[in-house]
Amino acid sequence: MIKITFMGAGSTIFAKNVLGDCMCSEAVRRCEIALYDIDKTRLEESKLMLDAINNNINENRAVIKTYLGVENRKEALRGADFVVDAIQVGGYEPCTVIDFEIPKKYGLRQTIADTLGIGGIMRALRTIPVLADFAHDMEEVCPNAWFLNYTNPMAILSGYMQRYTGVKTVGLCHSVQVCSKYLLTALGMEDKVEGCRDLIAGINHMGWLLEIYDKDGNDLYPEIRRRAAEKNASEKHGDMVRYEYIRRLGYYCTESSEHNAEYNPFFIKSKYPELIEAYQIPLDEYPRRCIKQIEDWKKQKEELVNNPTLTHERSHEYGSYIIEAMVENKPFKLGGNVLNTGNLIENLPADACVEVPCMVDGVGIHPTRVGRLPVQCAAMNMTNINAQLMTIEAAVTRKREHVYQAAMLDPHTAAELSIDDIVKMVDELIEAHGDWLPKFH
């Protein structure tokens, strides 16, 4: 019986997707599931939900156990074959609020702040020490386990784990597998979705849709470029930033326009406030989502936790398919975040965590060599990679000057603030986060 440990099991809806998916797989459903969290209430709620699913769709073939608190973490991990990571260190309050409100005082506005920007940097710095503890325990009690990381900022966290721990790990995002379908549907090309083939590579949340063909091998990009330009010129919609990418850079990318609006110096500019309306950029979007999520949870709790008839249908999340592929030695293709070892992407650095097609089988995860990205796409990725690598450096060295440098290298922060203001803002953020961050010297 394989063992799957879920770190951050209080992420109830996500636990339902990944672990419910596992119970839908004939190869995986007879498993031991270890639920780990530091929040007693949320851990119990997830257990109730998964017990119902296990009973209703799995004939109770999974054995589900809970482990509360740091003192029980090692036992949760002991003997695990797969460890799923879905934690959020510091939560909406206080940490996400701090990540938005202090930069706002300096005139630095954000949309999501979980991947890059000053918010992404701070999130990484408070999360890496926790992952380092996970890794230390895993190296002791489950050294052969695969660590499936869903936590953001994906490229920074996975890059840290891949370079500085002995844990086998891959970063998994939701955006690669839905990228082409979403684009084609939004452009009225639904008839091209079935059987379409694509190539996506780059970095997490800025993976480039490099090639896309219909089932007969016809290149769909010329029509995509025409329709995207026409749509941006004629109407307001929620994906204007990425359509502008197509126009200016030639290619669409994986993650949403609200995310990508803050990964560059082009759209959120205090000197050009009209761009916010022009490109439909939702400032402070992530706090709004958090507040709505908290409000919605009361209703969802009834549907998920207090519902003895709860069932589940398999989702498109990669987790269960990876586990299934390894258990059955059945090849499966995914877009994974891995270290750029062996020039997977030739014109990005070896230290970078890149997102490339990967094949999974009984031996493990095998990244595909893509070659060179178009120069402009690699250059856009590099502006993000610079800040990612510097953030990892700051996490490893615990030097405050490296935190300053990570913020200085962030394209949006650098475009808006002076160096002196960046330093003041970072100092204020470190002070406000308190014990959620390690000590920087």
Image: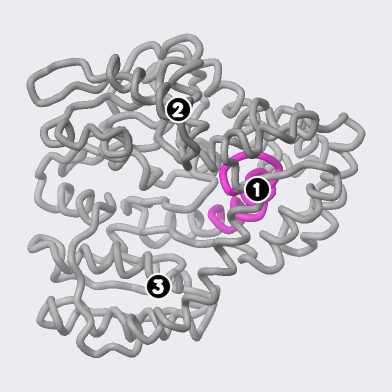
* Of callouts 2 and 3, the N-terminal one: 3
Question: Contact (CB < 8 A) between labels 3 and 1?
Answer: no
Q: Residues within 10 Å of mark 2 (few under 14, many from 20)?
A: many
In three-dimensional space, the C-alpha distance between marks 2 and 3, rounded to whole angstroms, equals 34 Å
Residue that appears at 71% across and 39% down: 394
**What is the magenta range?**
112-132
Q: Secondary structure at mark 1?
A: loop
The answer to which image quadrant residue 333 occupies is top left
Circle 3: residue type = Thr
Disc on res. 1: none
- What residue do we see at 19% from left, 77% from top? 311
Instruction: Looking at the image, tell me whether mark 3 or mark 1 is earlier in sequence order.
Output: 3
- The quadrant where residue 387 appears: top right
* Residue at x 83% of width, y 32% of height: 417
Q: Nearer the viewer, mark 3 or mark 1?
A: 1
Dominant secondary-structure state across the stretch colored magenta:
helix
Q: Which mark is residue 283?
A: 1
What crowding class fits label 3: few (fewer than 14 Cα within 10 Å), some (14-19), or many (20 or more)?
Answer: many
The residues tagged by marks 3 and 1 sit, at their Cα atoms, a distance apart of 27 Å
Q: At x 76% / y 39%, what residue is drawn?
A: 403
Read off the residue under disc 2. 243
Instruction: Looking at the picture, tell me which residue is in the foreground, 320 or 251.
Output: 251
Q: State how the image is colored.
A: one colour
